[in-house]
Image: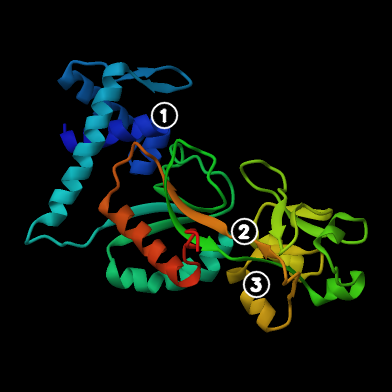
Amino acid sequence: MDRFDAMQAFARVVEAGSFTKAAETLHMSKTTVTQLVQQLEARLRVKLLNRTTRKVNVTADGAVYYERVIKLLAELEEAETSLPGASALPSGRLRVDVPSPLASLILVPALPSFYTRYPDIQIDMGVSDRVVDMIDENVDCVVRGGELTDLSLMARKVGDLEMGIFAAPSYLERSGTPAHPRELEGTHHRTVGFLWARTGRALPYALRNKTEQLHINGQHALAVDDGVAYLAAGLAGLGVLWLPRYMSRTHEADGRLVALFENWTLEPMPLYVAYRPNRHISLKLRVFIDWVAELMAEHAPVADRRPT
């Protein structure tokens, strides 16, 4: 029995809650993973997992052992890269999930610079706005906009997305240009709704000027749960959009979107990188998070909230 492989297999089964899912992410057969865990239990003379036909649960002894194992595996990885004769560059597979507009407009175009620094990291990037089960899907981190509601996750704030309200010229020609945000809640105007993954519904947006503060949702004929589709709907003239400026900038420049209510301001949308608290931050994950933070400092720096 290779103790390293056995500990790695055990840790993955605990995280995935399934021998089958663990085997898939480790690129091993289910039989191999099962044998490795059984050999580990036999060597330790302790039952680490309770197995049922539907679920695998960690025992009390297994939970204690798991916490030690993930630290040991992380320390081993760091030890291998810290030797003078070893490569100091992080390596291995990193599984991340990011919103589709952020991926296509900012992260993916900048990846050549990331690979110049870290050529031995392999990124498997899920591109979505859905809720990701980080344990079942073995995802190392997610990048998400908006306040995080899952308090079980660790998170680092990496940006504040400046927001604006926009419409396509075709929409404004058909429906007219609204003079006040309250008009969006009437029957004459339509918005494009964005269905947030954590709630499954469109949420109101906060606006303010020198004398008023409002929360506007608007009436939508179409609501979507993907940022790229949301932008496409607005460009097609299907309604008014609330967009981060990084998504609108090019389309404002070429006249395909028109900014509305420019004497009103919207609260910026916070951007976070979130990861599981029970996972040691590996070197490859740490450098990826640092790189995202560095990149967003150029595009959407964290706002200074200190009073002036």
Residue at which label 3 appears: 248
- Regarding mark 1 in the picture, which secondary structure is present there? loop
In the picture, the disc for residue 267 is 2
Q: Nearer the viewer, mark 2 or mark 1?
A: 2
**Residue drawn where x is 46% and y is 50% of the image:** 142
Mark 2 and mark 1: Cα distance apart in space: 39 Å
Q: Of the residues shown, which amino acid type is indicated by label 3?
A: Ser
Which residue carries the number 1 mark?
Answer: 17
Q: Residue at x 62, y 58 (%)?
A: 267
Mark 2 or mark 3, which has the lower sequence index? 3
Give residue 82's position: percent from left, percent from top. 12, 55
Q: Check the picture and name the quadrant holding the N terminus.
A: top left
**Who is closer to the viewer here, 210 or 271?**
210
Per the model, the C-alpha gap separating discs 2 and 3 is 16 Å
Q: How dense is the environment of label 1, judged by Cα within 10 Å: few (below 14), some, or many (20 and up)?
A: many
SS for callout 2 = loop
Occupied quadrant, residue 192: bottom right
Residue 184 seen: yes
Query: Under tag 3, what secondary structure?
Result: helix
Question: Between disc 2 and disc 1, whose residue precedes?
Answer: 1
Q: Which class describes the residues within 10 Å of circle 2: few (<14), some (14-19), or many (20+)? A: some
Number of the front mark, 1 or 3? 3
Q: Which mark is residue 94?
A: none
Where's residue 152, x and y in %? 45, 35
